[in-house]
Image (cartoon, grey):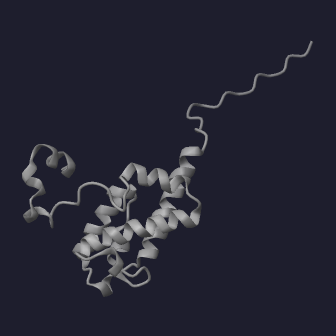
């Protein structure tokens, strides 16, 4: 189900009673998903990490039903009250906003926001490197034509 599509033709989907089920609409930390991924690709590594941490703090705060300022970067999310279902919800939000897959074991293993940011940035870098590689030859190799001597 594409929740944003549901919201577009069913205004009742934004009702408070569904807020715990549906992912938050709109931007996170002032960035849409595509904008966020473009920003991460062009920022220097330290600034990209800071942006990723800011967005992850907002996503974790959404799941934990608190404000981002109350989510410490170095503290395991399990110590903040995040259970396995909440971790799965966070993994879905991270996938939606960063287009990165967090393995279930990583999401449930009580990661810190800094560990999640490193994982997200590593996947972003791997994706960028894969895009810049030249395409590989898929057909059979052509044998070099033998040189003809006069």
Where's residue 130, x and y in %? 54, 48
Question: Which quadrant of the structure image shows residue 9?
Answer: top left
Residue lying furthest right in this view?
150
Looking at the image, the residue that sits furthest to the bottom is: 79
* Residue 138 percent across, percent down from the top left: 55, 34
Pick the front one: 140 or 72: 72
Query: Disc count in the image?
Result: 0
Residue name at image x 41 percent, y 75 percent: 113
Quarter placement of the C terminus: top right
Compared across the picture, whether 147 is left or right of 105 comes to: right
Q: Is residue 139 left or right of residue 100?
A: right
91 left or right, relative to 50: left
Who's the residue at 33% across and 69% down the image? 58
Instruction: Please name the residue shown 54% across and 57% down the image.
Output: 125
Q: Is residue 132 above or below residue 139?
A: below
- Front residue of 142 and 111: 111
Give me the residue at 40% from left, 85% from top. Answer: 75
- In the displayed structure image, the side of residue 7 where residue 62 appears, left or right: right
Q: Position of residue 12 (x, y in %)?
A: 7, 53
102 w.r.t. 41: above or below: below
Residue 40 is situated, as x and y percent measured from the top left of the image, at 50, 57
């Amino acid at each position: 189900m594409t929740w944003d599509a549901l919201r577009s033709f069913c205004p009742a989907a934004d009702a408070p009673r569904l807020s715990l089920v549906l992912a938050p609409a709109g931007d996170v930390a002032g960035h849409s998903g595509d904008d966020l991924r473009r920003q991460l690709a062009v920022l220097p590594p330290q600034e990209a990490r800071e942006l990723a941490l800011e967005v992850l703090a907002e996503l974790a705060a959404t799941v934990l039903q608190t404000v981002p300022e109350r989510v410490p970067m170095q503290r395991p999310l399990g110590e903040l009250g995040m259970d396995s279902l909440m971790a799965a919800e966070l993994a879905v939000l991270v996938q939606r906003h960063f287009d990165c897959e967090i393995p279930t074991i990583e999401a449930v293993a009580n990661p810190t926001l800094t560990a999640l940011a490193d994982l997200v940035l590593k996947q972003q870098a791997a994706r960028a490197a894969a895009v810049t590689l030249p395409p590989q030859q898929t057909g059979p190799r052509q044998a070099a034509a033998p040189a003809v001597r006069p």
